[in-house]
Amino acid sequence: MIVGRSKNINGPFVDKESNDMAKGGGNILLEGDKNWYGVGHNAVATFYGIDYIIFHGYDAADNGRPKLRIEKLKWENDWPVIY
């Protein structure tokens, strides 16, 4: 999962170092590992003042079956961080 942002909905979208995402920029928020082969198709929601990121991942411990994952999300210097 790679993040970037823009002041305009039409872009350009940039990462923390102002690299254009259309030219390879972007900061990794979350990536697959030995427990989760891949993650993606995310959304962010707020419940009772707490932000969550909702996404799918392929569970390595369950033959790669897709699972819904929900993780708390915080913001550091206006950038998302999963904790």
Image (tube, rainbow, N blue to C red):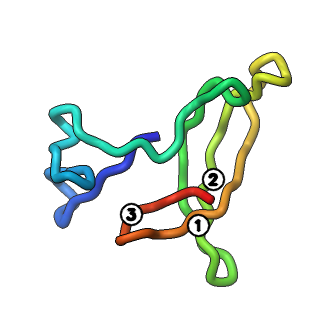
* 53 sits to left or right of 13: right
Residue 26 percent across, percent down from the top left: 30, 43
Say which amino acid is labelled 1: Ala
Q: Would residue 81 appear left or right of 23 to someone viewing this image?
A: right
What residue did someone put label 1 on?
Answer: 45
In the rendered image, the vertical position of residue 63 relative to residue 25, given as above or below: above
Point out which mark residue 54 bears: 2
Quadrant in the picture for residue 5: bottom left
Residue picked out by circle 3 = 79
Query: Residue lying farthest bottom?
Result: 49
**Are the residues at dot 1 and dot 2 in contact (C-beta closer than 8 Å)?**
yes
Label 2 sits on a secondary structure element that is strand
Q: Which mark is residue 28?
A: none
* Residue positioned 63% across, 28% down in the render: 33
The residue drawn where x is 67% and y is 56% is 71
Crowd rating for badge 2 (residues with CA inside 10 Å; few <14, some 14–19, many 20+):
some
- Image coordinates of residue 68 in percent, x first then y, are 73, 43
For label 1, count other residues whose C-alpha is less than 10 Å away and answer few (under 14), some (14-19) or many (20+): few
Q: Left or right of 55: which side holds 17?
A: left
The amino acid at mark 2 is Ile
**In the rendered structure, which disc, 1 or 2, sits on the residue that comes first in sequence?**
1
Q: Could you give the CA–CA distance between mark 1 and mark 2, rounded to whole angstroms?
A: 8 Å
Q: Against 53, is 38 above or below? A: above
**Element type at mark 3:** strand
Q: Mark 3 against mark 1, which lies toward the viewer? A: 3
Find the residue positioned furthest to the top: 63
Most foreground residue, 66 or 20: 20
Which circle's residue, 2 or 3, is located before the other in the chain?
Answer: 2
The residue drawn where x is 62% and y is 59% is 83
